[in-house]
Each structure stands twice: as C-alpha cells, then as structure tokens.
Image (tube, grey):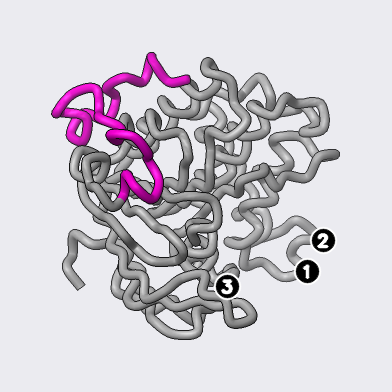
Amino acid sequence: MNQDIILEGSEIDLSFGGIKSLDKVNLQARRGEILSIIGPNGAGKTCLLNCITGYYRPQSGRIFFQSHDISSLPPYKIARLGISRTFQTPSLYPHLTALENLLLARYTFTRSNMVQDVIYFGKSRREEITSRQILEEILSFTQIGDLRNRPVSLMSYGERKRIELARTLVMQPKLILLDEPMSGLDSETKSLVAELILKIQKRGITIILVEHDMEVVMGLSQSVIVLDFGQKIGEGTPQQVCCDPRVIEAYLGGDGLHPASDTAASEPAVGLDRKG
C-alpha cells in the first residue's frame, strides 16, 4: 500500500436480504486529509462506515488500515488499531457526566485485571493516571471543560455532539469517522464543530466525513466520494465533484454546488463563517 494512504477499501460488497447496500465500492483515504462521503439517503454511506469499523462484515472485498487487513476484525480490535467514530445520533450514557463518558471510552485500552482494579494498584493505577491526563488535555483542546461534571441528560443536543466528538479523541485515533456531525445543529454550533474538525485535522488525524450539509462538505474537504444506490458514482476534489453531471443528476440537483473559490480544497477554512 502507498504510504500516503492510511485506509483503503477494495471491491466492498454488502447486502441485506438480497438488497445491495454497497456494490463493489473502492475508496482510499490519504493521511491527514478530510475525505467526505456524500449521497442521497439510503446511498450506503453509513453502511460503509459500519464496514470500516467492523459493525458490519462485507460479503466480499477487503479493507486495509495502515497496511493491516481489518476486514474481519471485531470493532474493539479495530478501535485499538486507531479508528474511532461518531454516530448520527450521539450514543452517550445520559445519566453519566461528560467526564465519565470520556473515561469509559478509555476502557478499550485498559490491560489491568479485576484484582488490580479492585485494589487500585500497579497497572490499574498507572492506566487510570494516564487516562486522566489524556482526558484533561482533550477537555482543554475541545473547549468543553465547563461541561465536565454535567450529566449528559441535562445537555443540549449540540453539547452532546461536542462531547461525542471529544470522546473519539480520548481514544487517540489516527482516523476518525464522523457520521453527520452537523445534523440538528444551529449555525453557531455548526461553526464550533467545523472549527474543531479543522483543529483535529491539524493534529495530523485523518477524517472521513459523512454529511448532507454541502456547504460544510465543500468548505472542509480535500476529497469527496459520491455514493448512489450503493455504487460509487463520483470521486475527486470538491470542485470536480460538484460539477460532475452524474453527481448533479443523482444528488445535487440544478447546476450543482460551486465552492466559494477555486482554493476551497486546499484552504478548507474558506467560508466557515457562512455555514448555515
């Protein structure tokens, strides 16, 4: 695998009851980029994320992460390799605080046994100290320190989205999958989330973004893949995709969406203040 490619999927097929959700889909994500996957409802976008993270197992095809074949690995092993994700609806524990939800996300990485956990000694103590240090850094980085002791049930929808995004970071990922992070958010919160996504990218973390807000997609992405009925019908830079006749017909409508400037792909921050 090309060293610039962090994730590669080849000929991915996924069916449910004879209905094709993914039909020989190929994709490549380059290190440090934001790759967006777009398409109409039911196009197979979330199914593709579920295959990457091990929630679904494709009937055929292979998925490689940093040259490791992860096609048949369970989700927890894929997470340990450095892939984390968010969901369309935040999947947090409502009666726990933000801090407690983030601590639980570190559980995948603990190696201590029950006896060590009970007496809080040795490896158990060292692991919790490490986890607490990571959490404090992430709370500061994501600017959600004021929410740390608040139960999730008392948070707004936008605050829950930010907590879930922070939760992906405490797993110290190399690749983050974001499933519609802007859905249900007002324009102000969208701007906060978009700025956070760019900050995450600047850390060298690769991001795969599934999103319906085309202004967000065009403003943030370096590459875009378009799915329709489980098939990839377009791929390229935001400029190339938004002018592709097949993509326009299937998804964008009209004359397509044109980025604010020809530099949108290389300058992802363009237009962030206009997100709505």
* Coordinates of residue 71 in the picture (x, y in percent): 45, 79
Residue 116 appears left or right of 229: right
In magenta stretch: residue 248:
yes
* Coordinates of residue 101 in the picture (x, y in percent): 71, 43
**Residue that badge 3 annotates:** 56
| Type of the residue with mark 1 | Met
In magenta stretch: residue 259:
yes
Element at badge 1?
A: helix
Q: Residue at coordinates 39% horizontally, 37% vertically from top-left?
A: 200
| Type of the residue with mark 2 | Val
- First in sequence: mark 1 or mark 3? 3
Residue 204 visible within the image? yes
Nearer the observer, 231 or 93: 231
Secondary structure that dominates the magenta span: loop
Query: Would you place residue 263 above or below residue 96 in this image?
Result: above
Query: Would you place residue 240 above or below residue 11 in this image?
Result: above
State yes or no: discs 1 and 2 in contact (Cβ < 8 Å): yes
Q: Residue at coordinates 67% horizontally, 46% vertically from top-left?
A: 103
Highlighted magenta segment, given as a residue range: 247-276
